[in-house]
Image (tube, helix red, strand yellow):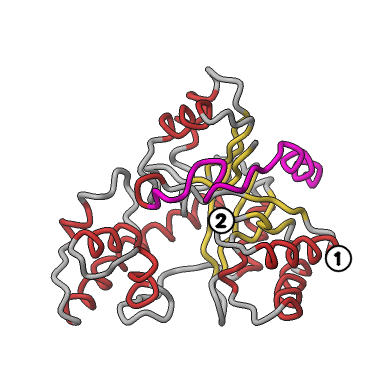
Amino acid sequence: MIDLHTHTTASDGSYSPTELVRLAEQSNLQALAVTDHDSVAGLAEAHQAASRTNLELVNGVELACRVQTGTLHMLGYFIDLDDRALGDLLGRMVESRRKRNPQIIAKLNQLGYEITMAEVRTLASGPIISRLHIALVMLQKEYVRSIDEAFGRFLGDNGSAYVQRIEPAPAQAIELLHGAGGLAVVAHPVHLRAADEQELGKKLKDLADLGLDGVEVWYPEHTAELTEQLWRICQRLDLAAVGGSDFHGAAKEYIKLGTGRGGLNIPLEILERLKSRL
């Protein structure tokens, strides 16, 4: 099995890069992509840890893109970690996130929820503090019953405490990932909020016309019906079909590395097909 969508303490995961690699080895994975939000800071440590194993490690990153409806995240694979243009964008995105967090907390305070930046910071093991960390504090204080509720009511795009941050347009994200020698893949397309297969196909075709390389077909939140729809769309548009668990560790303890909610089991062949796009 392989897992092409994971997070470490370099963004909002609870496992260090070394711990994640160790868990991947214990889980009998053959390949692992580390795809931290707006960051490649954990990859050097991950490579060092993977060099002592038989695990194939793929350089990755996850970028949030600016779209009018739904949520679009782009996974970049096989990227050059020293690419200057991509590095500049990541730096600006991290700084924008840093400025946004106090604004979100201020909105929550105005809504009557007592949360401080200091409380949120204690849950972040790395340099990046995300909305997930804020959601965890809300869960600890029993302001919400789940992470999903925190995002649905408060922190998501339509939430009452949402604050916009710097996000590249899809065309810019694809161009930068290609410029860094990598491939661009749509993450968890369930969040595109397409009404049906026809609308989903239209959204993905528009991205394919911009140079998109693939789609995350296998994902824990995808129903069997949606997975089949995505597979058909990939075949029709000649896009690579990939998959991953979106593993975060303790923050989403119901998601297991490699298997997601129990049924991912993505074969190594999927990675080999993705490589052929290079």
What is the span of residues highlighted in magenta in the rendered image?
252-278
Query: Residue 220: which disc?
Result: 2
- Camera-side mark, 2 or 1: 2
Front in this rendered view, residue 134 or 24: 24
Q: Position of residue 31 (x, y in %)?
A: 62, 33
Q: Is residue 69 above or below residue 263?
A: below
Q: Position of residue 48 (x, y in %)?
A: 49, 24
- 2 or 1: tag closer to the N-terminus: 2
Q: Amino acid at mark 2?
A: Pro
Q: Position of residue 206 (x, y in %)?
A: 74, 74
Q: Amino acid at mark 1?
A: Arg
In the image, residue 265 lies in the stretch drawn in magenta: yes
Q: Position of residue 51 (x, y in %)?
A: 55, 20
Quarter of the image holding residue 231?
Answer: bottom right
Q: Residue at x 72, y 36 (%)?
A: 268
Front in this rendered view, residue 181 or 144: 144
Query: Residue 120: which disc?
Result: none
Mark 1 secondary-structure assignment:
helix
Q: Residue at x 28, y 62 (%)?
A: 134
Q: Residue at x 67, y 43 (%)?
A: 266
Q: Residue at x 63, y 56 (%)?
A: 176
Q: Is residue 277 above or below residue 19?
A: below
Judged by its main secondary structure, the magenta piece is loop
Residue 205 horizontal side relative to residue 80, left or right: right
The reply to whether discs 2 and 1 touch (Cβ–Cβ < 8 Å) is no
Query: In whole angstroms, how far apart are the C-alphas of marks 2 and 1?
Result: 23 Å
Residue 99 horizontal side relative to residue 115, left or right: right
Residue position marked by numbered label 1 in the rendering: 236
